[in-house]
Image (cartoon, grey):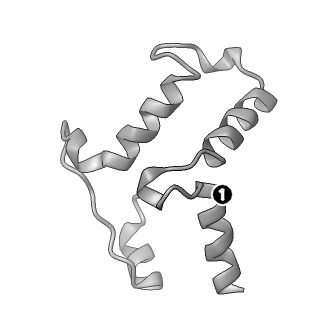
């Protein structure tokens, strides 16, 4: 995000950076890493996966209901946001 200042000026969206070694500041990221570990254990070589396999994993995660989204899926929330802007 080397261009975060330009992004903020263009979108009026503030960019925040977490402190190093502070996973508590990256809750959503840490949760997603945990979900990914169900498919890919830490240290696994991702080149062992085809793009088709990676797409299937992404689709499964995007179609998985999340408590933080009121038990909606990320795909549902994304579709709703796109519909609101269109």
Q: Position of residue 4 (x, y in %)?
A: 38, 67
**In the picture, which quadrant includes the C terminus?**
bottom right
Q: What's the residue at 50%, 16% (across, down)?
A: 41
Q: Going by the image, does 68 lie left or right of 52? A: left
Q: What's the residue at 58%, 14% (across, down)?
A: 45
**In the picture, which quadrant includes the N terminus?**
bottom left
32 shown above or below 11: above
Residue ID for mark 1: 75
Circle 1 residues within 10 Å: few <14, some 14–19, many ≥20:
some
Q: Nearer the viewer, residue 48 or 74?
A: 74
Q: Position of residue 73 (x, y in %)?
A: 59, 54
2 shown above or below 45: below
Q: Farthest residue toward the front? A: 71
Count how many numbered circles sit on residues in the image.
Answer: 1
Q: Nearer the viewer, residue 76 or 3?
A: 76
Q: Nearer the viewer, residue 31 or 46?
A: 31
Quadrant of res 16 = bottom left
Q: Farthest residue toward the right? A: 52
Q: What's the residue at 30%, 47% (across, down)?
A: 26
Give the SS element for disc 1.
helix
Q: Position of residue 31 (x, y in %)?
A: 39, 40
Q: Going by the image, does 74 lie left or right of 42? A: right
Q: Nearer the viewer, residue 33 or 72?
A: 72
46 shown above or below 24: above
Q: What's the residue at 51%, 55% (across, down)?
A: 71
Q: Going by the image, does 15 lie left or right of 38? A: left
Q: Position of residue 5 (x, y in %)?
A: 36, 73
């Amino acid at each position: 995000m080397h261009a975060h200042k330009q992004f903020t000026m263009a979108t009026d969206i503030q960019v925040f950076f977490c402190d190093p070694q502070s996973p508590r500041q990256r809750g959503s990221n840490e949760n997603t890493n945990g979900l990914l570990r169900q498919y890919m254990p830490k240290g696994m070589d991702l080149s062992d996966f085809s793009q088709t396999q990676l797409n299937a994993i992404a689709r499964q995660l995007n179609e998985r209901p999340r408590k933080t989204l009121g038990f909606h899926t990320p795909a549902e929330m994304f579709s709703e946001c796109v519909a609101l802007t269109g």
